[in-house]
Image (tube, rainbow, N blue to C red):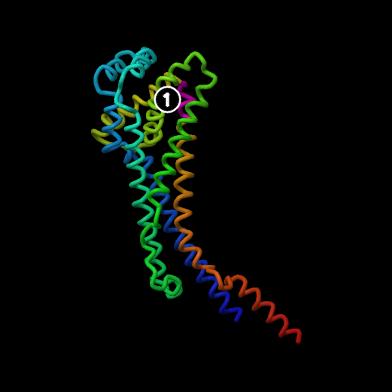
Amino acid sequence: MALAAAAEQRAAESLAADVRDAYQDAVDRILAATQNGALLRGEVLARWQDFVGTGEFFRAMEQNIGRLRDRAGAFFRGEPAPAVRVETAIETGLQAVILDEAANAAEDADRRWRSDPAGRQLLGGDDLSGTTDGFAAQAAAEIRAWQVALMELIRTEGQDKRSRARWLSFGINGLGAALMIVVFSMTAGLTGLEVGVAGGTAVVGQRLLEAVFGEDAVRRLAKTAREDLHARCQDLLHAEQERFLSRLASPGTVPPAELSRHAAGLHRLAASA
């Protein structure tokens, strides 16, 4: 009985490891997408370019970066394309990546379990190869919460800079959009023309933030925002994997470790009789 319980425990641990590996791989792929420039392409890049423009604002930067404070101040007092379009594009793009990788993780975990007799028994006729109901809404809500937290980072950073308060009042959404772009670009693996397009566009956001907060503060803000995003993605995927793991200790069953302890106790009692 003890041997059977030990074997059952090893099987449960193996199945749990399969699930955790599948979902951790998905987390890693999501994080890679936030670092390799993937989110600076397509709609996000188009909306960011719409926001900052490609004419006088860029030329002013290239000709005299020292005038950026005045230029950017005038820019935000004008009527640029709404920064919210950048935020929405980022939300949509990031959500698509998270949903895709969560589905890949579920399919991978389901496949691994079905290749194991114990896993097949636990799954029964249920198909867990897709995401849970409501996961898309949860992912979107988490991304929006991250964006709100990022804006709060900017407000907090600007609290002690009273001389620059007008920047925050006029450009909090613009600065937030710029920081999101920087978060996805500081370790981006851009190549070829993308360096001149996405990379160059991201430089605008970085220089803009540096003009307000300084270079060291921008690095700190980007690092904090990135770590927060990574933690939120990890939590989302960890919650998703629980529908597999919960089957390893479903109600009404005795966990394998407890079976092993009971068996060991019975063995000791038999030996002392």
Residue at the spot 62% in from the left edge and 71% down from the top edge: 258
- Rendered-image quadrant of the N terminus: bottom right
Vertical placement of residue 39 versus 1, above or below:
above
Q: Would you identify the image quadrant in which residue 72 lies?
A: top left
SS for dot 1: helix
Q: Most extreme residue toward the bottom, as rendered? A: 273
Q: Position of residue 47 (x, y in %)?
A: 28, 32
Q: Position of residue 3 (x, y in %)?
A: 58, 79
> Which sits in the foreground, 92 or 182?
92
Residue at the spot 45% in from the left edge and 41% down from the top edge: 229
> Which sits in the foreground, 261 or 127?
127
Q: Residues within 10 Å of mark 1 (few under 14, many from 20)?
A: some
Vertical placement of residue 154 versus 91, above or below:
above
Q: Position of residue 202 (x, y in %)?
A: 34, 29
Which residue bears the numbered disc 1?
A: 172
Q: Most extreme residue toward the right, as rendered? A: 272
Q: Would you identify the image quadrant in which residue 7 lies?
A: bottom right
> Which sits in the foreground, 37 or 126?
126
Vertical placement of residue 215 versus 136, above or below:
above
Q: Amino acid at mark 1?
A: Ile
Q: Is residue 10 left or right of residue 201?
A: right
Instruction: Residue 229: say if magenta.
Output: no
Residue at the spot 38% in from the left edge and 36% down from the top edge: 184
Instruction: Residue 214: say if magenta.
Output: yes
Q: Is residue 247 left or right of residue 131?
A: right
Q: Which residues are magenta?
A: 213-220
Task: Characterize the magenta stretch by its predominant secondary structure.
Answer: helix
